Structures are given as C-alpha cells and as structure tokens.
Image (cartoon, rainbow, N blue to C red):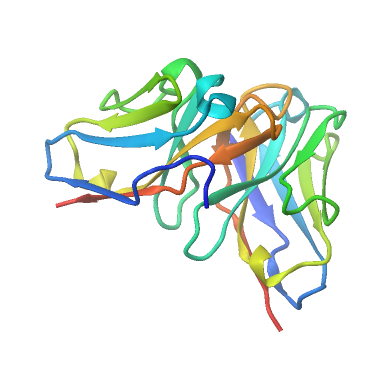
Amino acid sequence: QSVLTQPPSASGTPGQTVTISCSGSRSNIGNNDVYWYQLLPGTAPKLLISRYNQRPSGVPDRFSGSKSGTSASLAISGLRSEDEADYYCAAWHDSLSAWVFGGGTKVTVL
Amino acid sequence: EVHLVESGGGLVQPGGSLRLSCAVSGFTFDDYGMHWVRRGPGKGLEWVSGISWNSGSVGYADFVKGRFTISRDNAENSLYLQMNTLRPEDTALYYCGKDIGLLWSGGLETWGQGTQVTVSS
C-alpha cells in the first residue's frame, strides 16, 4: 500500500488531455513539492515535473503539474503514442523523514 | 551529460548479502546527495535510502533499516548499497539517483537504468 494514492490506470486518444491525480496528506504533499516521473520499459525513469511545478530542460510543455492542498495532478495535453508509460508521483514525508511514492498510473493511448 | 550506471545485482539466497555500486559521470559528484530506489515485480517505486554530499547525513526506509547501508566514495565518483540479510521481498530492480541538491531531501533528478536483485532459494 503506497503512501500516496494514484489511480492504477488512465487512457485517452491521441490529442486528448489526460490528468493523473496523486493524493496524500499534510505531512507529504501538503507541506512539500510533488515530483512526477515517467517510466518507460527498459529505460531510466525520467523526471517530468520538479519542485515549484517546474519542467526540467527537454520536457515538453505538454506536461504540467499542479497542487492543491494535499492533492496534486499531472496533466498530459496533446496526448501522443510515445506518452504510453507508467507515471509516478513522489514527495518528501516530514514525519517519516523519507521519500514516498504513489503506486503508479499506467497511461494507455487508445 | 549525466550518467549513472548501476552494477552488482544478481541472484542471492535468502539471508545472503550483495553490494550494489553506482558509477557516475557528467557532474560534480560531491556537490549532490544521492539515492537508491527500487521497483519490485508488479509493484511501484519504493525509496530505499539517501545520503548527503559528504556522507554526513543518511536515511533509510523502515523496511531496510538495520539491514542495508548506503555509502559513497567521492574520490571514485561512486555510490554503494550494502544489502545484508536479504529477503525474497527485496527482489527488485534497484536504481541509483542523483538529488537536486547537497542533501537527500531535495528530490530525485536523474536516475540510472537499474540493476536486478533476485532473492530466492
């Protein structure tokens, strides 16, 4: 059971917008930045959204992050076939003094 | 370009030990904290351990405390994870990761491709 809660799956057709939610608590998302990662089979995980909801260099602006209270979201607009991957949220957990992840969301492009 | 290359994984019996290594290049190693994260079969990502730039601060997930030890050699640009008393549930792909800052509380920025650890009799 992951500390952060994500839906196991999400899907959309090419060009659509898919939004993935990540729910936590005040000890993690509520007090700290949320990071988002993309995992493609056989490749290193890739950071999509960093602190302050910033995109690292090279990440398309189709990917955007937001946060409200103890929940965060990752939106993928203009969905493409290459976006088919697993996506994870992560945040620092104050009382555990540890990083916690969501269970991951598998995005399928129909 | 930043590169992180893990090694040292393999098949080990329950109760056994392994030492993972992570060789880095493309950045000033001793300016950044580092991490180990794993992904078990059919499971999500789990943070395992973190270490600050100078090894002065380390942290562990509860499920590895007392069994795993993280360390680094800044002269060799290398990160290590000594894993003892291994359990079948430790079976996973282990990734090393670079933090965005000096400590291990800033956030994982860049990852390696992982090394597979399988604990089975």
Residue B83 horizontal/vertical position (percent):
80, 59
B108 relative to A52, above or below: below
Residue B106 horizontal/vertical position (percent):
63, 24
- Residue A59 falls left or right of residue B83: left
- Residue A42 falls left or right of residue A27: left
Q: Residue at the spot x=56%, y=19% of the render?
A: A31
Q: Residue at the spot x=42%, y=34% of the render?
A: A23
Q: Residue furthest bottom?
A: B121
- Residue B117 falls left or right of residue A54: right
Q: Residue at the spot x=45%, y=57% of the render?
A: A42
- Residue A52 falls left or right of residue B38: left
Q: Is residue A10 at all visible to an observer of this figure?
A: yes
B77 relative to A33, above or below: below
Q: Is residue B26 at all visible to an observer of this figure?
A: no
Q: Quadrant of residue A48?
A: top left
Question: Along the line of sight, which residue is nearer the eye, B23 or B94?
Answer: B94
Residue A65 horizontal/vertical position (percent):
36, 24
